[in-house]
Amino acid sequence: MGSKKTVAFHTLGCKLNFSETSTLSRMLENEGFEKTAFENIADVYVINTCSVTDNADKECRQLVRRIQRKSPESLVVITGCYAQLKPEEIASIPGVDMVLGAAEKFNIAHHLKELTKGDAAKICSCDIEDVSGFHSSFSIHDRTRTFLKVQDGCDYNCSFCTIPMARGKSRSDLIEGVVANVKKLAANGVKEIVLTGVNLGDFGKGQNAGNSAGSHNREENFHELAMALDKLEGIERYRISSIEPNLLTNAIIELVANSNTFMPHFHIPLQSGSNRVLGLMRRRYRRELYAERVKLIKTLMPHAAIGVDVIVGFPGETEEDFQETFQFLHELDVTYLHVFTYSERDNTHALTLGPVVPIPVRHERNKKLRNLSYMKTQYFNQQHAGQTRKVLFEENDKNGMMEGYTDNYIKVVAPYKQEWVNKIVDWKL
């Protein structure tokens, strides 16, 4: 018997990609592959790509070049959003052996059996309209916090976004499928689950593609999923990764406020604080609705953390629009901002809009909002100084220190203690 073939993975992008990479890894390990670190020499390298920004595309190309230098005989497989959007572009990168689109990534083991180095790069992809199945995935590489995918795809048509083209129509698992996965994770000692999806609040669509065969046409929604999970034994913490403001209902907010397992932590994309720009972006709400959601959360849970996604430099964003966004966020009781500099994406409606914001102006606006984010986070942390909150400590030993997060997502750093790993500890901030 020859020794096992080794496989190394690298993930670009979101929590959803991490959950899928972890599942692909387990699939290949079940087929007899041995997983190794990406820094090591491996027989096969798998890069799971993102395509939200230009940077993710560049990073993919850099990684392939790095593999070519250190291990030119290894097989290189590219999958993920970039692979679905631009398969020919990726196939033309020297060193790439196979490109797997959205429908084929979970057939990776089958495709690897037929792959040999030196042939022209093989593209296994199809039109995104033909992608309909739902594959549940979860990450379990780090026992402390697990990303569990419960939904995929998106039916929205935001003018800046390529995700519907990369991941297809909105579809999701069945509640019974999610519950089965949660029980499995609880049995593995997982303490915290982050529920992830492309458009999580849309959970309940396309369920005939759930884990079980046959068609299920009963209506389910995210609130019902959360109620079902809240009743289960074994998992101490759930977080909602990101949810659109128009899909974050009062019922969901009230459930979190009254739950012992759903953490007081929300991540709600805003994208702009200007109603004019929200219209250009084809978002499905106005800033007034966003402010209402934040107000209700803070009324029911004054201690809750709220994260915000915001895009700067969108085509047509004037200095006045930006100031409106800045002022809106400055006055809003939120905790931190994820600031994205707008980057042009092929085949999006935003390319037809103008005037284009110069790159230096985009960067300057990004910097201003990141400074605002830092101040808001500092203020939030200071408000909780002296309180005792529950912290779940993580595995990693960083130079004798360990990290953990409170229920409301305040990061805590403490001297490393093995007995605290994956334990929830009462901690005075």
Image (cartoon, rainbow, N blue to C red):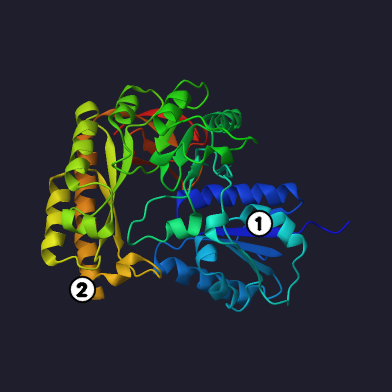
The answer to whether residue 375 is left or right of residue 247 is left
Give the image location of residue 196, x and y in percent.
Answer: 45, 43
Quarter containing the C terminus: top left
Q: Which amino acid does label 1 sit on?
A: Thr
Q: Nearer the viewer, residue 252 or 69?
A: 252
Give the image location of residue 302, x and y in percent.
Answer: 21, 30
The local crowd at label 1, few if under 14, some if 14 to 19, many if 20 or more residues have their Cα within 10 Å, is some
Report the disc number at residue 36.
1
- Image quarter for residue 208? top right
Q: Which amino acid does label 2 sit on?
A: Pro
Q: How far apart are marks 2 and 1 (CA)?
A: 48 Å
Give the image location of residue 98, x and y in percent.
Answer: 65, 68
Q: Mark 2 points at which residue?
A: 355
Q: What element carries label 1?
A: strand
Q: What element carries label 2?
A: loop
Q: Which of 172 and 426 is in front in this view?
A: 172
Quarter containing the N terminus: bottom right
The residue drawn where x is 12% and y is 66% is 319
Give the image location of residue 220, x and y in percent.
Answer: 46, 31
- Image quarter for residue 310? bottom left
Nearest-to-viewer mark from 2 and 1: 2
Against 286, is 125 above or below? Answer: below
Report the disc number at residue 222.
none
